[in-house]
Amino acid sequence: MEERLSLLYGKENIQYLSHQTVLVIGVGGVGGSAVEALARSSIGTLILVDFDCVSSSNINRQIIALNSTIGKKKTECFQERIHEINPQCKVYSFPIKITSENISTFSKFPISFILDACDDTSAKLAIAKWAQTKKIPHLMALGAGNRVQPNKVEITTLAKTKEDALARKMRNLFRKEKLSLEIPVVCSKEKPIVHFSSPIASSIFVPSTAGLFAANYIITFLLEQKEKNLSK
């Protein structure tokens, strides 16, 4: 697996990535695509958190959703899948819902980066507070539903997002908690399609693109940190 990656990044960088630990909270449309990309990019340890099971409604957009995985825990499905992709990758499965009380569970791990790809505002706030307190690099995924244009996905900061109701909610919560709005986010500039019924409309294009953007950001960030540390 490393042969072609090494041609792009160099063997030393691939070896470095194999010693990094990424915590991914939420392994649905965005998080699932990010997890797969990280596993295929030689990340050495993945900690996967998601309390949900695969359902038939996930099949249109989530990489782990197959007829054969319906009813199974998403994190456990990914544990099996990643073993098939990269047997050297250590995968820890936590089928739990994140709260302010249990987020410290992950303090025992040497986490290099956190990807928040969940859609619960209280969980997102707990993750951000913990990440900023612990000074762990952190990327937040925002709304990917009700959108169809993958070319509108971007990495920006929470302070600068547009056309994103979830971002507005998070900014309000961040201001109340006096948290920095200058955290990186993966989001879409596309104006959501008006949709009055439930559940949220979705397809594979925007969530999977956001997941790949997130994974690429993480890999790039980690390698840049390596170079910064070497230059000190």
Image (spheres, helix red, strand yellow):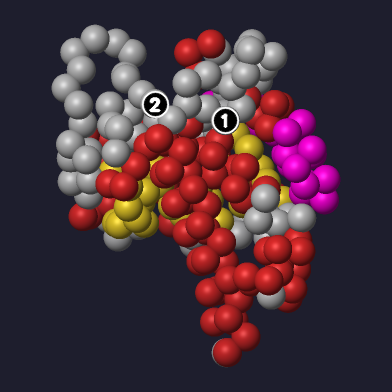
Point out residue 47 in the picture as x, y percentages from the top left corner: 66, 43
Q: Position of residue 102 (x, y in %)?
A: 57, 35
Q: Position of residue 76 (x, y in %)?
A: 71, 27
Q: Is residue 152 left or right of residue 204?
A: left
Q: Nearer the viewer, residue 26 or 155?
A: 155
- Three-letter amino acid code at the position of disc 2: Ser
Q: Is residue 138 above or below residue 226?
A: above
Which element is circle 1 on?
loop
In the rendered picture of this protein, how many numbered marks are placed on residues? 2
Q: Which residue is mark 1?
A: 63
According to the picture, the residue beneath numbered tag 2 turns out to be 203
Quadrant the C terminus occupies: bottom right
Q: Residue at x 62, y 42 (%)?
A: 36
Q: For the N terminus, which image quadrant?
A: bottom right
Q: Is residue 139 left or right of residue 193?
A: right
Any magenta on residue 87?
Answer: yes
Which residue range is magenta in the image? Answer: 79-97
